[in-house]
Image (tube, rainbow, N blue to C red):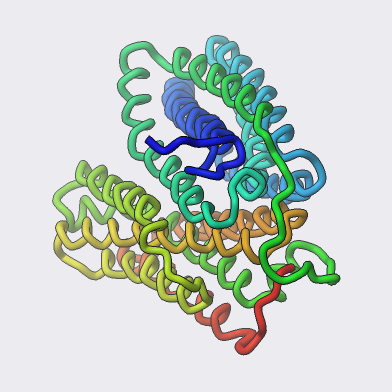
Amino acid sequence: MEKVTARGERGIGTGYGRFIAAVATSFYGDWFTTVALLVAVYQLSPGPVAPALFTLVRVASTPGGHLADRVNPGLLTALTSAVQATATLALVAAVTAGSLPLIYVLVAVSSFLGALARPAHMPIITALVPAERRPRANAQYGSTFSLSLAVAPALAGAVVALTGPRLLLLLDAASFLVAAGLLISLPLRRPRTQTAPPSPRRGSAAHTVLAQPFLRLVAAGGFAGGLCATAAQAVLVVGAADRFGGASHVGFLYGAVGAGAAAGTLLSARLQPASITRATIAVWALVEVGALAVVAITPSVALAVVALAANGAAAGLYQTWATTEVQRRVAPERLGSVAAFNLSALYLGWLLGAGMGIALGGRLRWDHLLLVACAVAVATLVVAAGAGRGARASRI
């Protein structure tokens, strides 16, 4: 086995290993709480609060990026994890008391804290891992999330069926405390500049991203992928019942996306091209969107499963490559803000896709709605890819 050190001279580094352990623990805990609360709220009485909570969670990412640029990102994520542990313990009491309003408030608080912390992950990776190791590090980070998506909900479903939601909430609270301890111990350091000197220009994260053709296309890819993903989530169960053998087959469809995403992220370091350009991002983002269009037009469940696996794999590949290139192009003191803007673009796509599902779900056939979402996504990518041709890449 390859020996590792805190600075990552060989392998990736023990510091990065602790970070991945913290992230994995947190990801699994998040899914435990998600399943537990879905069951608890259903048992109490579902209410029309999800859209409001969704908006709150998404807006929270922007201040998180600014914080990550100004304070120690390890300390930021450790503190938010510790407070989330307290909020999750309070959720146990809220579920026991059967108080829906308190459950919703605590979920909003915990989600807000999580959104504050997530933009700090990119600066942490950049600080812990040398540039030549980052493709592998980013692949491990992405695959950690993909594997948690494939495994954690199934585990949580089995536990909640046997014990109810409280044990899952307690496990999540413990996961936050473990993550906080790991994150506070990270040996963060300022990475060395590898390419061009920093640009003297400054401005908001929005200006930074929108002024740079590559960064703009990465953000557009996140928006397009998020839009199509939530539109697909709104209609896949209908498509399964209508064309793919029954509503119960929707699990196979979701599983194909997760399996493809895990494969894509795991293979991204091996398959990474020598140069990550706008064309690279545009082609794979179009594959991600186009695969969902195939689902809308195919009559075959087997082809639908293959297309959904391709959707997940394309996203896993190009998003990991894009992360590596963003880390190379963006100065460390701006990574948090840029990451937050890209997350906001993804969240905006999620929100628009969900809105399309609600507004058009009763008016269009499921396959037509999915095709409309794909068309909007493709148009977004074409506009973002076509703007700013000939602009020279520089470190910002």
Task: Quadrant for the C terminus, please.
Answer: bottom right
Provide residue 51's location: percent of width, then percent of height: 57, 45
Please state the total of marks drawn on the protein image: 0
Q: Pick the residue in front: 255 or 250.
A: 255
Left-right relation of 326 to 172: right
Q: Pick the residue in front: 301 or 335.
A: 335
Q: Could one spot residue 206 in this view of the protein?
A: yes
Left-right relation of 29 to 347: left
Q: Could one spot residue 376 in this view of the protein?
A: no
328, above or below 258, in the image: below
Kindly identify the residue that appears in the image at 50 percent across and 30 percent down. 21
Provide residue 177's location: percent of width, then percent of height: 60, 19
160, above or below 357, in the image: above
220, above or below 319, in the image: below
Location of residue 131 by image quarter = bottom right
Provide residue 4's location: percent of width, then percent of height: 50, 36
Left-right relation of 77 to 169: right
Kindly identify the residue that appears in the image at 64 percent across and 85 percent down. 388
380, above or below 45, in the image: below
Kindly identify the residue that appears in the image at 49 percent across and 66 percent down. 224
Task: Quadrant for the N terminus, please.
Answer: top left
Q: Pick the residue in front: 358 or 296.
A: 296
Provide residue 201's location: percent of width, then percent of height: 84, 71
Kindly identify the residue that appears in the image at 59 percent across and 51 percent down. 130
Q: Pick the residue in front: 8 or 170.
A: 8
